[in-house]
Image (tube, grey):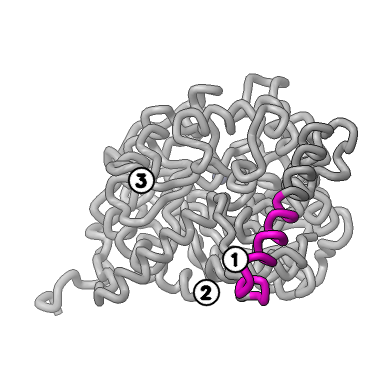
Amino acid sequence: MTSNGHPSENTRLLSGRRDQDTENQAPTACESNPKVRGVVWGTLTLLFVIAVILLVGFERVFGDAFAPWLGKLPKDPMLAALAILDKAPVIDTPRLQLTEIRHLSYDFEDLPILVRAQYANNASAVDLESEMPGHVDIPRLRKGKVGGFFWSVYVSCPDPDLEGKDFLGGTWRVRDTLEQIDISKILINKYPDTFALALNTEDIRKAIIGGRIASLLGVEGGHQLGNSIAVLRQYHALGVRYVTLTHTCHNAFADSCGFFSGMIPLHGGLSNLGRSLIDEMNRLGVLVDLSHTSDATAKQAISHSKAPVIWSHSSARAVHDVPRNVPDDVLELIGREEGKKDAVVMVNFAPFFVAEPNNATVKAVADHVDHIARVAGKQHVGLGSDFDGIGDVPEGLEDVSKYPALIAELYSRGWNKYELAGLTGGNLLRVYEGAEKVALELQAAGTSAVFDLYDKRTDIPKEHSDL
Ligand SMILES: [Zn+2]
C-alpha cells in the first residue's frame, strides 16, 4: 500500500515538510582535470536546460506521464489524491465498532447492541477481512489508503444518578476499559500482516513503510480512569497513547462540552486533579486530547500542558455552530509561534457536527479543514473521521475507503502535496513527536511520577499521619 521503494520521500511526506536533499558526491576523475570537468558540466547543464524547457514549456504535449519526473502530480484530482496517499497514507481516528460502546441515549443507532450483543467482545467471532456492518474493515482500510489509526477504547459515561455528583459511585468503567484494550490488542495480533501495534512515532513510521497499518490505542474519556492517576500509568503501560480529558460528561478532572446543547460547567475548566493528570500525561508521553472538552477546559489545558495537544475528532464551530466543534478563539491559540501551542485538530466527519441536516458532504467537510487551516495554519489540521463512532455519514465519505475523495477535493482547492501529506498524517506525527520529546526531557530531568489523589476519595488516607 505504500511505496516501499522510496522511504526518503515517504519520510518527507509523512513529516509534512519539504526538506532539502543533500547529496555528497564522491570525488571523480574529472575533478582533477579542470578542462574535462568544464566540458562535462557544460554538457550536463545544457541537457538539463533543454529538458526543463521541454517538460515545462511543452507540459501539455507530454502530459501527466512525465509529471512525476518533475515531482508534479497528475492534474486529475483523484489521481493526485491517490498518488499522495501512496506516499503519505491516512492516520486517522476511526473507531472499530468492536471497541466502541456509545451511550444509547445519544441515538447512535445500533452500535452498543452490535458490540455487546452481536460479538460479546469475542474476537474469534469477528472477521475484519470480510465486510463489516459499520464503516471499517480491512479491505476498506486498504482501499482508503489508511496507514494508521487509533483504536478508541471507549466506554460510555456512567449514569450520573448512580455515580453521584462527586463521581464516587462504584462503576465498572476501569474494568470495561481494560476489556476494550484487551480485545483491541487481540484483534491487532489476529491480523499481523495488516496491523502493527504502535507505541511511538518510530513504530508508526516502521509500520507504514512496511505496508502495515499502525495501530494505536486511545482512551476516550477521563471517566474511564476511575479518578486515579495511577490508572493512567497502567493504561500507558498497556499501550494507551492518548486520553481524551472528558467524554460527554464532566468528571473529576475536567468539564465536558456535553453534546448538542452544551453543559453547565462544574469546575470552570480543569480541576486541580486535572492539572496533575496533564502533568503525568506529559511525563509519560500520553497525548492530551481535547475533543469533547468545554472551551474553558481546552484553553486551560493548552496553557498548562508542556506538550503539544490534539483534538482527536473535532471540527470548526465557525463553520457549524455546535459545542463539540472548536471555536476560533481556541484555534487562535494554536501555532508554532512564541506564545502558542503546537497542536492538531483532526476534523470529525459526523454529519451533525459538519452541517445542517442533509447538508453534510465531502465539500462541507473540506470547508471545516479549510477553516481550521485558515485560522490555525495548514500544519495544524488532520483527519479524525469518527467512522464507526457515528451512525450517519457525509455524502461522498461513507466509510474509510473514501478518504481519497476528500484529498481530491482539497487538492482541487489548491492544497499542495506537502500540505496534504501533513493533513493525512504528518501533522499528527509532528505533534506526537513533540509530546515524546517533552516526555523524554521530563524523564531525563528526573521528574517524579504524580501521586496526587482525588481529594474527595475516602477509601484511602490522604496523609501518612492519618494511619
Ligand atoms: Zn467522541
454 on left or right of 402: left
Secondary structure at badge 2 equals helix
Q: In which quarter of the image is ligand 1?
A: top right
Callout 3–callout 2 Cβ contact below 8 Å: no
| Snapshot quadrant of residue 458 | bottom left
User: Residue at position x 27%, y 69% from top?
Assistant: 450
| Snapshot quadrant of residue 331 | top left
Identify the main secondary structure in magenta: helix
User: Residue at position x 14%, y 78% from top?
Assistant: 464
Secondary structure at badge 1 equals loop
Of labels 2 and 1, earlier in sequence is: 1
User: Residue at position x 79%, y 48% from top?
Assistant: 68
Q: Which residue corresponds to mark 1?
A: 23
Name the amino acid, label 1: Glu
Of labels 3 and 2, earlier in sequence is: 2
Q: Quadrant of the C terminus?
A: bottom left
Q: Which residue corresponds to mark 3?
A: 341
On whether residue 41 falls in the magenta region, the answer is yes
Residue 42 appearing in the image: yes
Whether label 2 lies within 8 Å of ligand 1 gets the answer: no
The residue closer to the viewer here, 27 or 11, is 27
Q: Which residue corresponds to mark 2?
A: 238
> Among all residues in the image, which is located at the extreme left?
465
Callout 3–callout 1 Cβ contact below 8 Å: no
| Label 3 vs label 2, nearer the camera | 3
Q: What stretch is highlighted in magenta?
A: 28-45
Name the amino acid, label 2: Leu
Residue 429 in the image: state x and y as whole percent.
Answer: 54, 57
The residue closer to the viewer here, 390 or 250, is 390
Secondary structure at badge 3 equals loop
Residue 81 appearing in the image: no
Relative height, residue 27 to residue 433 (above, below): below
